[in-house]
Image: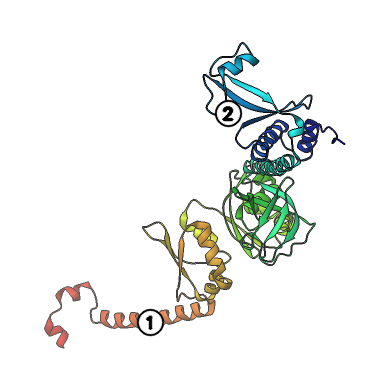
Amino acid sequence: MSEPEINFADALREVAQARNINELQLIEAFEQSLAQAYTRNVEPDKRIEVHLDPQSGELEVLVVREVVEKSEDDNLQISLADALELDPGVEIGMEMEFPVDRELFSRIALQAAKQTLTQKMRETERNVVFNEYKDREGQVLTAQVVRSDNKGNWFVELGAGEAILPPREQIPGEKLTPGNRVKIYLKEVRKTPKGPTILASRADERLLDYLLKQEIPEVANGIVEVKAIAREAGQRSKVAVYSHNSNVDPIGACIGHRGNRIQAVTGELGRERVDVILWDANTRDFIRNALSPAKVGLIEVQPDGHDATVTVTPDQLSLAIGKGGQNVRLAAKLTGFKIDLRETAAISDLDAAMQQAMEEGEMDTASSAAQSAFDALFKDSKSVATASPDDVQE
């Protein structure tokens, strides 16, 4: 009993539609895979070509031989005399095609073709995924959490492809749950021998930048510009903003009424603290703002343009440094300067300041008394003018 006739064109068309693969590319891959399989398993020394008609579904397997004056290899060549018997119009250099009986399409050849075709389909799918997401690098997408592995990686479904969130790109302490939808920054798409690797991030500062544009209209329309971001994911971030409209307070616009705007941003980041500060073209003022909430004193910017020395009173030093050095570390990243905090002994207590003033006043009084005693030696300018050593001795 013969096997039922298979319409390969219809079958490939269904596969192409189901897997979002270009139909003509899939047909070409099928032709190549079947030709390779037939050559390897049935006619190893012959040149084989396969043609599948996309419309009719007719499949042809052909042995191709070149017309030569005298054949030296009957597998690849045919002599001109033999060729003329088959076709009086042939000439040397032409190629002749000889159809293969379908009965010779052995099961092993078709199985090998199926395996090769599966590989081709997989490669095609990988290229589709790579091409789709390569153009979306740098975008923020909404993805569905799928699973994790024993290395701490999380995988999220983007649609046509799956992206990986390695531990370094996760928000520390954030609990992800399969089925949940989260926003991710598409950091990198690269080809590997096993297919495209899509690297996603929730720790990148550009995710924070995207969220600010989403939640704050003034940032989205360019009235308020985000000049710089320094972020330690899951803990704290600093955002430097500037208003191009003198009537718009950039910090107030970002915070929103009762903090509703900034809370919407932090809610997407696991309640990460976000400090909004005013950007300033003056380097010293920008550094001063970046170190807030600490109040700092004199700021000296070194000639190299990369280092700054900041004096801080004792009561503000720990605030300037921050927990684990976080405040000064974020300020340095935000401004691009290496910040060296120097403690100063300046008076910060009002009572101590008054006491010092009083002591200085007493010193001034004593000094004035000595001056008066000296001046009393001379009654007027005339006395000074006419005084002599003898007068002084008396």
Instruction: For the N terminus, give its image quadrant.
Output: top right
Tell me which residue sits at (52%, 27%) in the image: 72
The residue mark sitting in front, 1 or 2, is 2
The image shows residue 222 at horizontal and vertical percentages of: 62, 42
293 to the left or right of 9: left
Find the distance from the CA under tag 1 to the CA under tag 2.
116 Å
Q: Which residue is mark 2?
A: 76
Judged from this view, the residue extending furthest toward the bottom is: 394
- Residue 317, numbered label: none
112 to the left or right of 336: right
The image shows residue 126 at horizontal and vertical percentages of: 67, 44
Q: Amino acid at mark 2?
A: Leu
Mark 1 Cα shell of 10 Å, populated few (<14), some (14-19), many (≥20): few
Q: Which residue is mark 1?
A: 363
Which of these two is toward me, 202 or 368?
202
Q: Secondary structure at mark 1?
A: helix
284 to the left or right of 143: left
Instruction: For the C terminus, give its image quadrant.
Output: bottom left
Which of these two is toward me, 69 or 368?
69
The relative height of residue 264 versus residue 172 in the rendered view (above or below) is above
Tell me which residue sits at (46%, 59%) in the image: 337
Which of these two is toward me, 196 or 109?
109
Q: Amino acid at mark 1?
A: Met
The answer to whether residue 253 is seen in the rendering is no
The image shows residue 369 at horizontal and vertical percentages of: 33, 82
Can you tell which quarter of the image residue 221 is in? top right
The relative height of residue 59 versus residue 387 in the rendered view (above or below) is above
The answer to whether residue 301 is seen in the rendering is yes
